[in-house]
Image (cartoon, grey):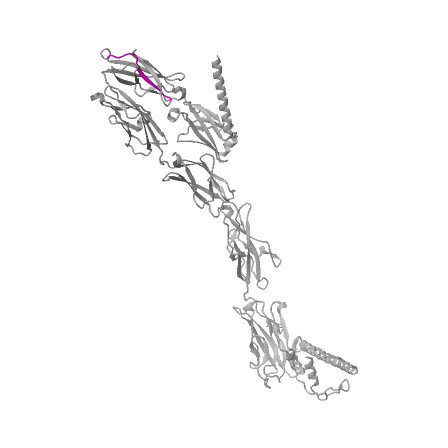
Amino acid sequence: MCAVDRRWSRRARALLCCVLLSVWEAAWGQLRYSVPEEIPKGSFVGDVAKDLGLQMTTITDSGIRLVSEGRTQYFSLHGKTGHLMTAERIDREQLCRLVEKCVLRCELIVEGEIKVYEIEVEITDVNDHSPSFRETEKELRVSERIAPGSRLPLPEAHDLDAGSNCLLSYQLSGDEHFSLAVQGGPGGDRRPELVLAKALDREETAFYDLVLKAKDSGEPSRTGTARIRVSVLDANDNAPVFSSAEYTVRVPEDVPVGSPLVTVTATDPDEGLNGHVRYVFNKISDRASELFQLDHETGKIFLKEKLDFEEISSHELEVQAHDGEELFDMAQVTITVTDVNDNVPEISVRTTLSEISEDAQSGTVVALLYVQDRDSGANGQVRCSLGAGVPFRLQSSRGSYYSVVTTKELDREEVSEYNVTVRAADGGSPSLWSSTVLTLKVLDVNDNAPVFSEANYSARLPENNAAGTLVLTVRARDADWGQNARVRYRLSDGRVRGVPLSSYVSVQAETGALYALRSFDYEEVREVGLWVVAEDGGSPALSSNVSVRLVIVDENDNAPQVLYPPAAGVSGAGVGGWSGVELAPRSSEPGALVAKVVAVDADAGQNAWLSYELAKATEPGLFRVGLHSGEVRTARFPLARDAARQSLVVLVKDHGRPALSATATLTVVLAESVAELLAELGSEAAAAGPGEAAGNLTRWLVLAVAAVSCLFLAFLLLLLALRLRRWRRSQLPPPAGGVLRGVPATHFVGIDGVRAFLSSYTHEVSLTADSRKSQLCLSPGSCCDTLPARPLPDEPASLLGEDPVGAPPHDPNHFAETLSKIC
């Protein structure tokens, strides 16, 4: 009873240790379970989700894979419960034939977190195999002279089970001349031997049939039997003897098939058949019997199949040498297989990302690799590396795992897809290597604003354009991809002459084409400055802008406008034009200024360059017009035969294409005085028609004479006041200095709306459509009296009495000289 209690106590402690070990290893990401072999498919192994602390939502959302070593997947993960289940029938003897402890390993990979959990499942043995003998019938040949107590080797039984299920015991039955002895081998095995209990007599009994029974220690136990026949031979004095009790040889695993590995040698001093030695394998494993072949005559051991160090690194054989009468000797042969670098490193991609955002932080794990080499020593030491020029590095993880992580933030615009080559090379000589390629696509992030193809844009648009005219097209490109690279255009807010910019121009949102919405007039708007904004389709959107300068090009759409002479009313014939009346003395010299035609053009540039030419004249050779100044001057001395009234038509023309023009009509009266001018004009008015028109002309003539008289009287009063002031100042001490400035008088006299020059001027005129830029320059020395003075019939006395001291005497030309000074 105490023994039973102690046994249960030991089992409880072992179970507690296993539970604590499982909890400890689960905390470090490793689980261990134990299941017996031959359990049905779908059997429960362990609660992985509970042991690792994983929530069912994590299992569902993160994408969990179970990866097992080898081609056959013996386990699966139940998606709803998180239980580890068997996926195939498991035969321990098939999987772990040469391994005492059978452990299957698998890995649980959580792809969302890129974590790996190792799971080890120990397959425990069940007593499902009976002991078996390689030779179910064995014949032993012994000499009748063999002494009692001699031992003969019996065939060993083999059991594929492990542990207690493999512990064998032997029983012998058949005859009292023989007994059974079991010896322990160097590896812990049990070797049965036949012990001779009584002396043999061939003449009495030539054959003995025995039964050898092997029994394992399983519950329930299993047995196996072999039949042993002992043949009694005549006496043989000497047994074969090996030259060495143990033979040891080291051979590389790449030794060619058929090569001799070792030769065992035994000698027998007997003669004839008793001295002829033959060699046989007495003890050899199943795998060794497939690999090695023994020459029975020579004792040479040959290689039948290729060796594999990674499968079995050492083989132990037992060779028996016997003579013709079955006297024998035993020798131990140990064949050690040395490793050769014949295995290429294996790279297994446990999990990998197919896409990564370009703004992923440095150090992001993109792949998890498992690298192994089945060789050993330096041949199994693996070095991993990545291809050059990639922003990734290898980071060694636990065991043979490597993580591929980013070394910097990626830029999709620089590289949109990476093909990362992972190379694994071992330390053999020569080195073996393998590689795998990881394909990683970089996802775009809206980190690039649109960029215009030019720093700024400018275009020239002729005025009077049609509404809807294409002005220019702006182009912007975005280095991003997809929606982030879709560029749309719009106008920035602005105003032109107080009107919103959008009423003048528009931009096509998709193409960037800029259109004029209305007809431009150069005289109103000469230049339009605006900003075009390019915005991508990202979230949030990025934008940039560019300056656009729209220059309105002038066209010749404005005819010259004559400022002087002023416009005349429409005549009775219904013809309108420009007219004016100018006075030219008959004594004028050639080149004397008669009048000046002043005109402007609202256009600009060449379209505003004006030229003047005399289109029509009463006397073609009497007057000429300055080509660029518009000044009308005499071309020769007036003659007596020349008509007193000259009509001139001056053509003003710009330089546009086609050229536009205007005309100015001047009436030049050849007269020596104002009276003659008025008489000429009066006669013209009288000739115009009787009645009310003649009365109006007379009234205007009277008003003109009255105005001239008033002006003359005002001039006399002013002259009198100046003389009195001069006389008074002469009575005082002379001042430091003083200058009498001339007082300008009117230079025009007109009648019935017609104005005439009384004096001619030389001046320069620069007129533009912009009044702020017009200039009028007068030359002081260019004023001259256009009416020469005539001596009066009776020169009146001075109105101021005696002239002041130093005053010149009065002469007939005094009045004209005074007018000239004032001018």
Indicate left or right for 410 with 329 as reference: right
Indicate left or right for 580 with 79 as reference: right
Quarter of the image where one finds residue 370: top left
- Magenta stretch? 188-201
Residue 803 rendering spot, x and y as whole percentages = 76, 86
In this picture, is 631 found above or below 221?
below
In this picture, is 161 found above or below 560?
above
Depth check: give the residue in front, 711 or 506: 506
Depth check: give the residue in front, 624 or 801: 801
Residue 817 rendering spot, x and y as whole percentages = 69, 84
In the image, residue 195 lies in the stretch drawn in magenta = yes
Quarter of the image where one finds residue 321: top left
Quarter of the image where one finds residue 176: top left
Residue at the left extreme of this rendering: 272
Residue 189 rendering spot, x and y as whole percentages = 36, 21
In this picture, is 661 found above or below 16?
below
Residue at the image position 23 percent from the left and 16 percent from the top: 235
In the image, residue 708 lies in the stretch drawn in magenta = no
Residue 267 rendering spot, x and y as whole percentages = 25, 24
In this picture, is 9 found above or below 488?
above
- Quarter of the image with the C terminus in it: bottom right
Indicate left or right for 750 with 552 as reference: right
Depth check: give the residue in front, 114 or 427: 427
Give the number of callouts.
Answer: 0
Asked whether residue 463 appears in the rendered view, the answer is no
Asked whether residue 632 appears in the rendered view, the answer is yes
